């Protein structure tokens, strides 16, 4: 491509008149008089179907990525696509509706270039992507003009400091200004287009730059100066996984447990229900299968809780407590987020009081997860351990009714809101108010209180997430014939795959590609059937999944009860009357790094900020909030002071040890449905030992980097 042509195509980040801002609905012409005909495009990167394709101008980006390219080649979400080669811009998924032509790509800050399209997934770090392409352009610069020669060199230096966690927010402003100056003053097309990767990643993925700077965290696990090992980096709680595995290998169970619980105060629970993102980044998967880190830390916790070893560790951790600070913190919600924050704030020397509307602590761990997945005794062990740190609990207290965030903020030095998402998402179809229709969390909550409703013989569950699977398997244990209705395919289900498989083994039936149309009641107003519209998968949406499109075909399923597992949201009555600023979805608006709301001294985290999430993500919010609350109360960062160093071996075997991944024993399906006994039986001692041997110790270096 000639320099003049490249100059004409260079990305301009200034919004053209009438062009919608990022995040709004993008309405652009499918054809443009200046971009007629077709062009050959090259699809490469994290995509199933690579190669050359000729398509007409005006074809949306999503058509190239999903319909032609088939989406990512690993099942992971698409994070971005770069168009135009090394000088092209990086475009996020919420702009994949953009028709591809010269004008529209230019408006997004990218170029058409040679027609190249590089697809990136969640394992790509956008800071690293920008650094890589700036490094390429810098090496290709002829050096004739100062903006390109010096400017790209300075930009590359700043990008390196960001990747190493040494940059500041001011550096980002400098980087942005540099990019604009180089773009507007370089003599040739190479220099003018070279800043596009930087300017577009700063524009669309600025949060990744901020994470590198403020959190010292690379979410993709690419910038190795910022993490200990891939598994530690991908763990929401940043557990030092290699450390506790190595301590366990050295037969130091007591210290292994101390290591685990200082990183994660609910290891028995997460050892059963965590969605184990560490597996996705484990380098052992390149040899055979990922190390089962979840089962190892479950075994360690189960071996220690309720024993003399546990008592000794409790005393050790109590000795970690900092002297009393004279500060008092109120935590609203005794679920995983609130319990985690309470544990660390107590260790930091603060007086912690946890308020909850239930009669016991645990939140969804206690009242939403079925006993067969997470026994109540496990949650009790962990709550008792946290309470022993000096945490006080006040139950049967509803915030917004008995107390308000404002009143608590006047009574305490700081307040942390950690409420869960117990309110059912709206679901408006005819007949939804019939007797016999119940929401999933209400159903699971009633069962946990030994007050399960009469379901009848035939039960239909609507939904495809974990709540749907939990409800279906619980109903099956109550003697019902259960059918799950889901509007997409099995592969699209967000539920944990092994849970779906176990539900099927237990006799739960599935009806896919069916969307509820109306609920039919009998003469007494009780549900007797549900009508579903058959769906087909249509165009890909922004999430990378095909949208279900209804057809004219309607089927009816007879049933005695219907359980709606169609999503949860925060308590809108509470958030609406809290006096706090809210996001559009009703969640509380906080600073994404400090977790503080706009009401001074009031912090929030977990589901009340993110919407419904999983246990480990919720706990990570509690851990981070404890650090930020302490820093504000005490005027300095003290979080690392409560952690003690461990000494352990730092050598690595020449060849991978331990053989194939160990499989935990599972109760036979016929026995499972007869009661609520735990299904996953956990590792034996021999299995836990063998699995620990499989760790490749990706953290190993000249010294133990964690210490």
Image (cartoon, rainbow, N blue to C red):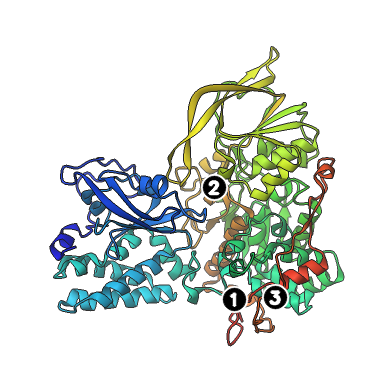
Question: How far separated are the C-alphas under marks 3 and 2?
Answer: 41 Å
Residue furthest to the right: 308
Residue occupied by mark 3: 657
Q: Which mark is residue 698?
A: 1
In this rendering, the label closer to the viewer, 3 or 2: 3
Answer yes or no: do the residues labelled 1 and 3 have beta carbons within 8 Å? no
Question: How far separated are the C-alphas under marks 1 and 3?
Answer: 14 Å
Circle 3 packing at 10 Å, graded few (<14), some (14-19), many (20+), is: some
Q: Which mark is residue 265?
A: none
- Ranked by sequence position, the earlier of labels 1 and 2 is 2
- Residue 70, compared with residue 351, is above or below; it is above
* Residue 458 point in image, percent of width and height: 74, 27
- Ranked by sequence position, the earlier of labels 3 and 2 is 2
- Residue 488, compared with residue 132, is above or below; it is above
Residue furthest to the top: 523
* Residue 297 point in image, percent of width and height: 72, 66
Left or right of residue 423, residue 503 in this image: right
Pick whichever, 565 or 659, lies toward us: 659
Answer yes or no: is residue 444 visible.
Answer: no
Circle 2 packing at 10 Å, graded few (<14), some (14-19), many (20+), is: many
Q: Quadrant of the N terminus?
A: bottom left
Residue occupied by mark 2: 611
Helix, strand or loop at label 3? It is loop
Pick whichever, 619 or 36, lies toward us: 36
* Residue 266 point in image, percent of width and height: 70, 61
Helix, strand or loop at label 1? It is loop
- Ranked by sequence position, the earlier of labels 1 and 3 is 3
* Residue 590 point in image, percent of width and height: 48, 55
In this rendering, the label closer to the viewer, 1 or 2: 1
Helix, strand or loop at label 2? It is loop
């Amino acid at each position: 491509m000639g320099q003049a042509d490249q100059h004409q195509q260079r990305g301009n980040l200034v919004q053209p008149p009438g062009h919608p801002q990022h995040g709004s609905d993008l309405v652009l012409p499918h054809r443009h008089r200046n971009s007629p005909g077709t062009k050959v495009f090259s699809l490469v990167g994290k995509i199933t179907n690579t190669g050359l394709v000729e398509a007409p101008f005006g074809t949306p980006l999503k058509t190239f990525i999903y319909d032609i390219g088939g989406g990512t080649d690993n099942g992971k979400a698409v994070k971005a696509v770069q168009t135009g080669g090394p000088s092209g811009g990086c475009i996020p998924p919420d702009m994949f509706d953009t028709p591809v032509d010269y004008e529209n790509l230019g408006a997004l800050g990218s170029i058409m270039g040679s027609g190249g399209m590089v697809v990136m997934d969640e394992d790509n770090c956008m800071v690293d992507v920008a650094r890589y392409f700036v490094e390429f352009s810098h090496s290709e610069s002829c050096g004739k003009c100062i903006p390109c020669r010096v400017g790209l060199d300075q930009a590359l230096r700043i990008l390196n400091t960001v990747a190493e966690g040494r940059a500041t927010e001011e550096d980002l402003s400098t980087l942005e200004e540099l990019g604009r100056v180089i773009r507007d003053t370089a003599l040739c097309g190479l220099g003018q287009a070279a800043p596009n990767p930087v300017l577009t990643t700063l524009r669309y993925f600025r949060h990744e730059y901020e994470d590198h700077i403020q959190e010292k965290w690379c979410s993709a696990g690419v910038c190795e100066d910022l993490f200990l090992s891939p598994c530690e980096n991908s763990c929401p709680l940043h557990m030092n996984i290699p450390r506790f595995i190595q301590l366990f290998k050295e037969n130091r169970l007591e210290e292994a447990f101390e290591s685990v619980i200082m990183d994660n105060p609910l290891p028995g629970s997460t050892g059963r229900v965590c969605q184990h993102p560490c597996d996705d980044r484990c380098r052992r998967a390149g040899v055979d299968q990922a190390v089962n880190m979840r089962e190892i830390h479950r075994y360690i916790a189960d071996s220690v809780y309720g024993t003399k070893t546990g008592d000794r560790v409790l005393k050790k951790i109590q000795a970690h407590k900092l002297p009393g600070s004279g500060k008092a913190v109120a935590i609203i919600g005794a679920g995983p987020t609130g319990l985690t924050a309470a544990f660390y704030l107590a260790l930091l020397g603060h007086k912690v009081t946890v308020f909850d509307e239930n009669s016991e602590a645990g939140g969804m761990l206690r009242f939403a997860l079925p006993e067969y997945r997470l026994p109540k005794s496990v949650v009790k062990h962990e709550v008792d351990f946290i309470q022993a740190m000096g945490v006080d609990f006040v139950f049967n207290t509803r915030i917004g009714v008995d107390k308000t965030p404002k009143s608590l903020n006047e009574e305490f030095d700081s307040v942390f809101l950690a409420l869960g998402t117990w309110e059912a998402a709206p679901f408006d179809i005819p007949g939804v108010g019939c007797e016999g229709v119940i929401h999933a969390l209400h159903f699971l909550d009633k069962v946990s209180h030994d007050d399960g409703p009469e379901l009848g013989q035939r039960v239909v569950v609507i939904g495809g997430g974990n709540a749907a699977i939990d409800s279906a398997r619980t109903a099956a244990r109550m003697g019902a014939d259960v059918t799950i209705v889901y509007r997409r395919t099995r592969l699209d289900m967000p539920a944990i795959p092994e849970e779906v498989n176990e539900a099927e083994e237990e006799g739960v039936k599935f009806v896919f590609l069916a969307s509820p149309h109306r609920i039919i009641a009998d003469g007494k107003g009780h549900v007797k059937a549900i009508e579903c519209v058959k769906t087909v998968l249509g165009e890909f949406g922004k999430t990378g999944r095909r949208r279900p499109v209804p057809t004219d075909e309607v089927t009816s399923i007879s049933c005695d009860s219907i359980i709606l597992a169609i999503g949860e949201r925060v308590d809108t009555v509470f958030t609406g009357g809290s006096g706090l600023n809210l996001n559009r979805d009703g969640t509380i608006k906080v600073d994404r790094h400090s977790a503080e709301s706009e009401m001074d001294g009031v912090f929030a985290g977990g589901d009340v900020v993110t919407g419904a999430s999983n246990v480990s993500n919720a706990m990570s919010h509690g851990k981070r909030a404890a650090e930020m609350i302490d820093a504000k109360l005490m005027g300095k960062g003290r979080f690392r002071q409560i952690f003690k160093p461990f000494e352990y071996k730092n050598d690595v075997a020449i060849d991978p040890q331990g053989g194939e991944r160990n499989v935990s024993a599972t109760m036979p399906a016929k026995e499972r449905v007869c009661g609520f006994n735990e299904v996953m039986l956990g590792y034996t001692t021999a299995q836990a030992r063998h699995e620990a041997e499989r760790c490749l110790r990706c953290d190993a270096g000249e010294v133990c980097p964690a210490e």
